[in-house]
Amino acid sequence: MKTRIFKNFKILFILLFTSLTYAKNYDIKALGADASGKVKCTQLINKTIELASNEGGGTLYFPSGTYFTGAITLKSNITIYLEAGATLKFSPDFKDYLPFQNVRYEGVFMNTFKPLLNAYKAENISIKGEGTLEGNGFAWWEEAKRINAEIKDKKTIVNPTDLQKKWSQENEGLKVEAYYENTLKTQFFRPPFIQFLECNKIKIEGVKIQNSPFWTINPVGCDDISIHGVTIFNPSKDPHGINTDGINPSSCSNVRISDCFISVGDDCITIKSGRDFHGRDYGKACENITITNCVMLAGHGGVVIGSEMSGGVKNVAISNCVFDGTDAGIRMKSARGRGGVVENIMISNIVMRNISRNAFTFDLFYDRESKVEVVTERTPIFRNIHINNVTGREINKAGVINGIEEMPINELSFSNITMEAKEGFSANLASNLAFNNVDIATQKGAAFEFSKCENLVLNDVKSKMPLVNQPIVKLTDCKSILVNNCFQKVKVDVFVESVNSEVIQGNNFLSLVTKAFKFDGK
């Protein structure tokens, strides 16, 4: 019996030892890190990561306190754990993010400052806990503001800093499209807070992230990402917090974003895949993305796709989100020259309030005006996008759809939408649009206005607050339009006003309408 007990104890000891070997905790404070936030512990943190990596991995544990640091490079099987009351505070000294390394900045690969938290070709890396990541972005924002003012005033950099000279030396010969060359003139590119490049199995959970120098969470070319229960706060008004997007997966696959609270100085969540030929050459779409149960306050857009989408974006599901105070709600943007296909997008169960621009935007004229081109790899494509179950109040404009002549936006549907807005929906150059059970109340103009659209289905559309002398639907130069099953419950002068458009009508109940259909002014 004693022999058996001894053997069982030995087996238990071996299992426990093995478990401890591969799940070792490294208490940064116990290892000598200053917890007052006054002395940098960059070297200690990075050396501990190297040590843990060499031993198979482990957790760097940050107990309550403030830890001052420069750039941190994560390795495979490493977890950063911040206890409640712990703050990892990053240095505002730009030199703490040298040497330059390969970073994707706005969809273009270049050599520039290290992201505050970075990794390359690592796997199974995590950032967890109830603590705070403080980006100390104010110094970066002020320098960017100073440089942009100099370029605006003098059209160039007259006396570049040593760091700007270094950027020019390390990026000699960097090619971009002509319209983006002005951006390169700054020679100063703020780092993302978190950029993991070509990594797998990433988890970011529970932490608060604030005051990012640039984009906040920006995985690039990664697979299997979970971002859960994260709070992101960056100042929302210029000049502070410029371009401080919340979560920007770029050319990533299998991404889950859930239960996050975001208030930032640019887009809250943006899905990207590279800019122009840089994105097409990298050739990796952003795909298989879910975004759910998130609340988004200040920001240019709630959930945005583009404008850097040249590698393509596909298979995206957005659900159960609240946008309250963002400039836009759902926004998809691109332009001629970008190329790339955005397709297979499903959006459902969204609540919007206090949207200062458009609740919905689908725009292929983002950034610049351009001329019609032959369809090539430079041609952007938006197709197979479906939106249902949305309610909105205090909206500036319900929606804008802008296609291009050589590639109209295609297969876009809206179902079960109720919205109160100053202006309604407008669409130009789109095909195979469908509006089902959509009620738009406006303060100005028609609830629905379409020009140069084809194969449009308007099924059970209406307005609970129609305007005097304004139609509910206005059509100009449209083909193959079906107006069906419409029941206008409130009196209105004209339901459909059509100019040079082909309209089929059926099963409508419009007894409260003075003139149901007005064709070419008659």
Image: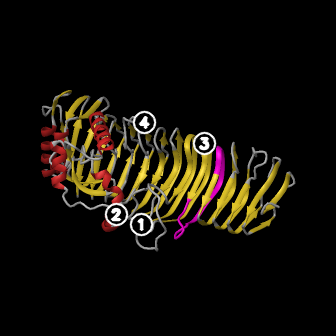
The image position of residue 362, as x and y in percent, is 53, 57
- Which percent across, then down, holds residue 163? 17, 44
Q: Secondary structure at mark 2?
A: helix
Amino acid at pointer 4? Ser
Few, some or many residues within 10 Å of mark 3 (<14, 14–19, 20+): many
Q: Nearer the viewer, residue 510 or 47?
A: 510
Q: Quadrant of residue 139?
A: top left
SS for dot 1? loop
Decide: few, some or many residues near mark 2? Use Cα within 10 Å; few <14, some 14-19, many ≥20.
many
Q: Position of residue 330 (x, y in %)?
A: 52, 51
The amino acid type of the residue labelled 2 equals: Gly
Q: CA distance from mark 2 to mark 4?
A: 29 Å
In the image, taking residue 13 as reference, residue 366 lies left or right, namely right
Residue 20 visible in this rendered orientation of the protein: no
Residue tagged 1 = 339
Tell me which label, 1 or 2, sits earlier in the chain. 2
Q: Quadrant of residue 517?
A: bottom right
207 to 74, vertically: above or below: above
Give the quadrant of residue 496. bottom right
Residue 48 visible to an observer of this rendering: yes
Marking on residue 395: 3
Quarter of the image for the C terminus: give it.
bottom right
Q: Residue at x 56, y 41 (%)?
A: 355
Which stretch did the figure color magenta? Answer: 402-424
Among numbered discs 3 and 2, the one appearing first in the sequence: 2
Q: Which residue is mark 2?
A: 279
Real-space Cα separation, disc 3 to disc 1, in angstroms: 31 Å
Q: Earlier in the sequence, mark 4 or mark 3?
A: 4
**Which circle marks residue 236 in the picture?**
4
Q: Are marks 3 and 1 in contact (CB under 8 Å)?
A: no
Q: Amino acid at mark 3?
A: Ile
Judge the density around disc 4: few (<14), some (14-19), many (≥20) Cα neighbours within 10 Å.
many
